[in-house]
Image (cartoon, grey):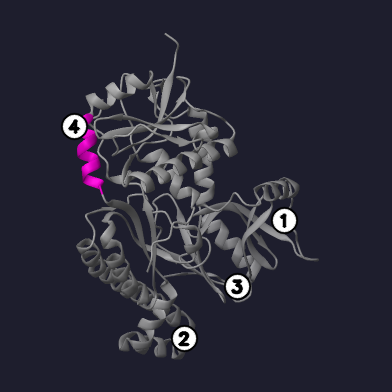
């Protein structure tokens, strides 16, 4: 038997065997292999992992993979996205057998994400803006500030330290309060929500402090509502919201039982 | 607000490499027992991910060339300025650019206090001795001995193993007693 394999991009809900064109990694022809009402979205390849030391090439492969998933999402509704470089040994019939073997769990996962997509919500705050606002209104801090001008250098230094500490804790209190109150509102409009462990500040937000980062599974008809809620948070002085998506539901598929 | 699908490479990489299906099937191709992702590729992308994250990939080539050009440099001094004392130590600022302990060589000159890093040849911190105040403070770390520097633009915490010696040298350079207990 000739060695062959299939590179798997995703599993989608479709019963039709069809060709999606030369849109795969390195322009490979992408097609579906159906079993009942689900299908693997694949291209044919040799049974070896895509591997390179060339960063630019690796980057291109990953973007091509991402593109195929996006396209499958548009065409089939939600899909189960697969990691980069998932390659199954065998021909189309072997893949169909694999789908058959895992049908129940794949079907359940697709059902769970049907008509939904993944979104990332990050809430940032601007320390100086918040601090400035608090300084304007807080009587105790104002008193301290006035005293600093009148004290000796050493005393002024200590007072300034005290003021800074107090201000810092008031800013974080205010930020925490907003995070908490917005979280319950966000929860009301999403199906599932995960707090991101890896808190990564986005490129254009480096001057701000990241307050909270969530990945959510959202029903298509609830995205506008979620956007309204986030608008309200975004309008608060000193706060900024970053809302990205739709992504394939990478964070909301459970493959643990897949074999 | 509407969600944006910005083509953030970092975000795409995070999803495609860290999330999504990781299978453990008989059919699957694996590399040295680690499934799925080619090891070289993973390494190439992982480093890129990190570099993108810290925004240091741009001008990488330029800055690394500059670094080598500046290597092996000596602390530049003003005319008539002399180095009185040198000791290995650290600095950290609670408010300022130096957020974590940064090591270097403390130089007390006749005019300035400077933390110098030999490679790439850079003054991490410097302040004129005039208007400098130094407080002795309890150390945040058992092994370290710390001082608080207060200068017109702000303050910094520094650490040296030979604190007393440093204080003496600084006092001599400044021609006055510097350290006071807090």
Q: Position of residue A66 (x, y in %)?
A: 45, 43
Q: Label 3: few (<14), some or many (≥20) within 10 Å?
A: few
> Which residue lies at the image location 56% right of the left edge and 71% below the top edge?
B177
The stretch drawn in magenta includes residue A67: no
Protein chain holding label 4? A
- Mark 1 lies on residue: B75
Q: Position of residue B111 (x, y in %)?
A: 69, 68
- Mark 3 lies on residue: B176
Question: Where on the picture, by quarter, is residue B168?
Answer: bottom right
- Mark 4 lies on residue: A104
**Marks 1 and 3 share the same chain:** yes
Q: Position of residue B97 (x, y in %)?
A: 53, 63
Task: Look at discs 1 and 3 and give the one toward the viewer.
Answer: 1
Gap in Å between the C-alphas at discs 2 and 1? 36 Å
Q: Tags 4 and 3 in contact by the CB under 8 Å rule?
A: no
Task: Look at discs 3 and 2 and give the one toward the viewer.
Answer: 2
Q: Secondary structure at mark 4?
A: helix
B4 sits to left or right of A189: right
């Amino acid at each position: 038997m000739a060695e062959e394999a299939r590179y798997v991009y995703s599993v989608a809900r479709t019963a039709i065997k069809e060709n999606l064109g030369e849109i795969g990694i390195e322009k490979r022809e992408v097609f579906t292999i159906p079993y009942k009402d689900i299908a693997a979205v694949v291209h044919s390849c040799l049974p070896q992992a895509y591997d390179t030391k060339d960063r630019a090439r690796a980057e291109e492969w990953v973007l091509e993979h991402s593109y195929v998933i996006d396209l499958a999402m548009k065409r089939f509704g939600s899909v189960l996205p697969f990691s980069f470089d998932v390659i199954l040994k065998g021909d189309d019939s072997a893949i169909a057998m694999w789908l058959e073997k895992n049908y129940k769990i794949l079907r359940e996962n697709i059902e769970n994400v049907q008509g939904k997509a993944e979104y990332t919500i990050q809430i940032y705050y601007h320390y100086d803006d918040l601090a400035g606002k608090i300084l304007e209104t807080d009587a105790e801090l104002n008193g301290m500030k006035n005293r600093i001008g009148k004290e000796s250098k050493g005393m002024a230094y200590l007072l300034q330290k005290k003021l800074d500490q107090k201000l810092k804790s008031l800013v974080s209190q205010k930020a925490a309060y907003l995070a908490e109150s917005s979280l319950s509102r966000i929860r009301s409009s999403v199906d599932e929500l995960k707090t991101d462990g890896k808190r990564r500040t986005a490129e254009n937000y480096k001057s701000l402090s990241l307050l909270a980062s969530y990945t959510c599974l959202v029903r298509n008809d609830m995205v506008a509502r979620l956007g309204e809620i986030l608008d309200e948070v975004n309008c608060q002085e000193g706060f900024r919201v970053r809302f990205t998506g739709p992504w394939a539901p990478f964070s909301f598929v459970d493959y643990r039982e897949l074999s | 607000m509407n969600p944006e699908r910005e083509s953030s490479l970092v975000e795409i990489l995070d999803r495609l490499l860290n999330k999504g299906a990781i299978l453990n099937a008989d059919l699957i191709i694996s590399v040295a027992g680690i499934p799925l992702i080619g090891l070289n590729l993973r390494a190439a992308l992982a480093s890129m991910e990190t570099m993108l994250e810290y925004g240091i990939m741009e001008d990488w080539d330029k800055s690394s060339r500059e670094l080598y050009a500046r290597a092996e440099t000596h602390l530049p001094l003003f005319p008539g300025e002399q180095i009185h004392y040198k000791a290995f130590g650290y600095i950290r600022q609670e408010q300022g650019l130096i957020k974590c302990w940064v090591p270097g060589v403390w130089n007390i000159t006749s005019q300035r206090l400077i933390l110098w890093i030999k490679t790439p040849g850079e003054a991490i911190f410097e302040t004129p001795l005039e208007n400098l105040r130094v407080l002795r403070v309890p150390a945040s770390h058992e092994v370290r001995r710390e001082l608080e520097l207060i200068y017109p633009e702000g303050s910094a915490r520094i650490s040296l193993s030979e604190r007393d010696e440093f204080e003496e040298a600084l006092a001599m350079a400044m021609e006055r007693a510097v350290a006071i207990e807090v």
